[in-house]
Amino acid sequence: MEEMVRVFMQRYEVPGFSVAIARHGQFVYRKAFGWADRDAGEPTTSSSLFRIGSVSKPITSVAIFTLIEKKRLKLNDFVFGHNGVLGFDYGTRFLDGVQRITIDHLLTHTCGGWSDNGSNFDYGSDPGAYRIEMSQAELLTLVIQAEHLHYEPGTHWAYSNFGYFVLGRVIEKLSGRSYEQYVRQNVLAQCGVTDMRIGGNTLAERMSGEVVYYNGDHVDPYTFNIRRMDSCGGWIGSPSDLVRFAMHVDGFSYAPSILEESSIRTMTEYCPISGDEDYAKGWRVRRGDWWHHGSCPGARAILTRTSNGMCWAALANIRNEDMARAMDRLTFNLADAVPEWHVRSQSP
């Protein structure tokens, strides 16, 4: 297993890598490799914290379902306008279709716009990456006032970081707390996770125990507003943190669940509009397996829950081309290296 990791790290020039694997509610493998800070000679440990990128989305989805279970929210609730959860907090007039967006549309990436690969703004793609100096409220107000939807909500699937950014504001509005506070208290703490937090933007804001991020794809890891995009990609944590979280929402009985069975079933129900993207609500799903990849400047992440009761997470402090699929294959191969675990040798 260690040789598999070393080959992967060498091929993709990965400074630091960490992985945790659990089976039937118990950790069976935890190992860290390489450097948390290469220049300082600081080794990566199993408790080192990494940016997790879009693996933040399952966490946000679970937080939404906690509010649904508390009767504070429904999936078909509108988000904006007279009947919306956020009302007119971010503007008094909306472009056509925006007031028809529901919580379900945001969870399933079917809101009809704000996608990562199709935008009206001249900044490349993801609306969440626009004008990094703007506050959350300024960015949200600008985008929903200026960004036309391309489709009627509920009719088209397009991956949207910005949709999950909006869900963070829904959580804040209904809870009366910051997104980070609500999730740490009502989701992560319930799973026994205490070290996860929203990361900083600059090297000077590096948290205690956090790795240093390296430029692998010509994008400076410290020129992106990670903190602003909290609910769609802002968390930092260790692989063990992510596995603990997943084991408490995995639908098995090995660890106490923090959600009701019906909520977990709804959360992981395949959205037909997503087609080959295999998306549910904050999770990708196929053949009984659930997973989510994470990518942000300087980091790659994967969290997987398999139908046979296994769960694993892996994190790296660099992002290189073609690395995501290879990292996915690596984690399946690591779990498959032990015959007793009976994991098929293929990635989702």
Image (cartoon, rainbow, N blue to C red):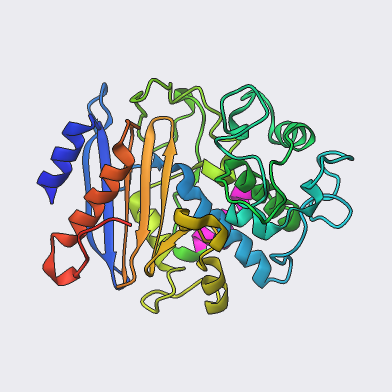
Would you say the magenta stretch is mainly helix, strand or loop?
Answer: helix
Q: Give percent across and percent down for residue 28.
A: 22, 64
Query: 144 or 260: nearer the eye?
Result: 144
Q: Is residue 302 left or right of residue 69?
A: left
Query: 247 or 4: nearer the eye?
Result: 4
Residue sitting at x 32%, y 30%: 320
Whether residue 145 is situated above or below residue 241 in the rendered picture: above
Whether residue 157 is situated above or below residue 123 in the rendered picture: below
Asked if the magenta segment contains residue 335, the reply would be no
Magenta span: 179-189
Placement of the C terminus among the 4 image quadrants:
bottom left
Whether residue 289 is situated above or below residue 87 in the rendered picture: below
Is residue 45 visible to the viewer in this orientation of the structure?
A: no
Q: Is residue 33 left or right of residue 87?
A: left
- Identify the residue at the far left of this view: 3
Residue sitting at x 45%, y 55%: 276
Whether residue 332 is situated above or below residue 38 in the rendered picture: below
Q: Give percent across and percent down for residue 301.
A: 37, 44
The part of the image, by quadrant, that contains residue 145 is top right
Asked if the magenta segment contains residue 185, the reply would be yes
Is residue 93 visible to the viewer in this orientation of the structure?
A: yes
Q: Give percent across and percent down for residue 203.
A: 44, 24
Residue sitting at x 64%, y 22%: 122
